Image (cartoon, helix red, strand yellow):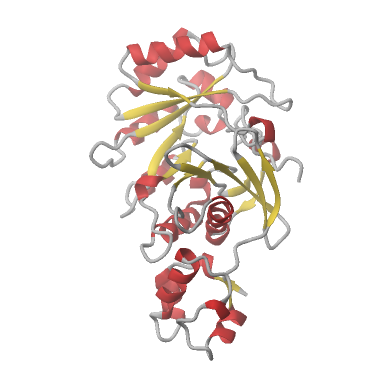
Amino acid sequence: MKSVFDVERQELAALLAPSYRATQIFKAVYQRWIDAFGEMTDLPKTERPRLAEEWKIEPPPIHRRFDSIDGTRRYLISLDDGELAETVFIPEAHRNTICISSQVGCALACTFCLTGKIGLKRHLSAGEIVGQVLVAQRDNLSLVDAGNFNIVLMGMGEPLHNYDNVMKAIRILHDTEGVSLSMNRMTLSTAGMLPAIERLATEPDIPNLAISLTGATNEKRDVLMPINRKYPIAELLDVVRRFPLKHRQRVTFEYVLLKDVTDSPEDARALVKLIKGIPAKVNLIPLNEAEELEYQRPSDETIERFHRLLTQNNVDAFVRKNRGNDISAACGQLMKKWA
């Protein structure tokens, strides 16, 4: 059976007669949260059973949900082949965040990230990516505030390693007859796959771009993020400088602070020099520790010193608050734990 979540509205329209059924189905599924064709009263009764035999419109089932003391929720979502997608819902005062995965596992093997330790199991389909959003949305929000969230592609996997499925999912979520999520409210994070970033720059609709940087020199990044050996830091920054940005839009650089590895004043000054002239902000992420990782979180004083050095040099920098650490939902901790 085919999944509606796997197709764009134009694709669905080409498969249905009359073609406007696609818009009716998109509105019902994404805007009214209907998960059975029998409830679509705007469709002819005679068509509903046939559509139900051909198309699946139920969001994927939740395998397990973990609730943090800070309100964060981590989901293990069941996929048709028995694999699990990992998704995190982060409640916030003004707008919630849904962190979604693009792969099961990851091939890039960043040494400070638990996901990299399990390797790449497989890519997620567009529908499996979209399905994560619907699960987190419907389990935490009501129809009244259904649009009160942002999406970050910062869960399991390297989004640009699964380029076609990720961009298709983004287009489906962006469709005005569906979830209708603005590109400004979607952020794609990459470790630095240069050809894919260049391809992304040519898209008609582009989400916000975040670069997982961490090391500010080749020497450190080669060890922490092996992808740097293929795409060195100078080449990465050259592509970022040429990336098309809208008025007042900025690139986000994510920088993980590792005790005695990436947290020194020299590291801070190297980072300032590296991103000079780029419309950017820096998210400082103190390491979320785990027993499987060899690194440690810096002290609060060290974190504050690093942050102060950036701001004193006119870099907009923010320290990301730890969320969901008690349920292994924090940044870099997704590993399908307690499945």
Q: Which of the pair 270/79 is nearer the observer?
A: 79
Where residue 289 appears, as percent x and y from the top left, is: 66, 24
Where residue 306 appears, as percent x and y from the top left, is: 46, 12
All told, the count of numbered labels is 0
Could you tell me which residue is drawn at 48 percent across and 88 percent down?
44
Vertical relation: 56 (above or below) 70: below
The answer to which quarter of the image holds residue 288 is top right
The answer, for residue 269, to whether it is visible in the render is: no
Q: Residue furthest bottom?
A: 46
Where residue 332 appears, as percent x and y from the top left, is: 60, 33
Q: Is residue 273 left or right of residue 139?
A: left
The answer to which quarter of the image holds residue 274 is top left
Could you tell me which residue is drawn at 44 percent across and 48 percent down?
148
The answer, for residue 118, to whether it is visible in the render is: yes
Where residue 9 appears, as percent x and y from the top left, is: 42, 70
Q: Is residue 179 left or right of residue 114?
A: left
Q: Is residue 76 left or right of residue 218?
A: right
Q: Residue furthest left?
A: 247
Could you tell me which residue is drawn at 60 percent across and 63 percent down?
59
Vertical relation: 111 (above or below) 3: above
Could you tell me which residue is drawn at 30 percent across and 17 percent down?
314
Q: Which of the image's four quarters has the N terminus?
A: bottom right
Vertical relation: 91 (above or below) 295: below
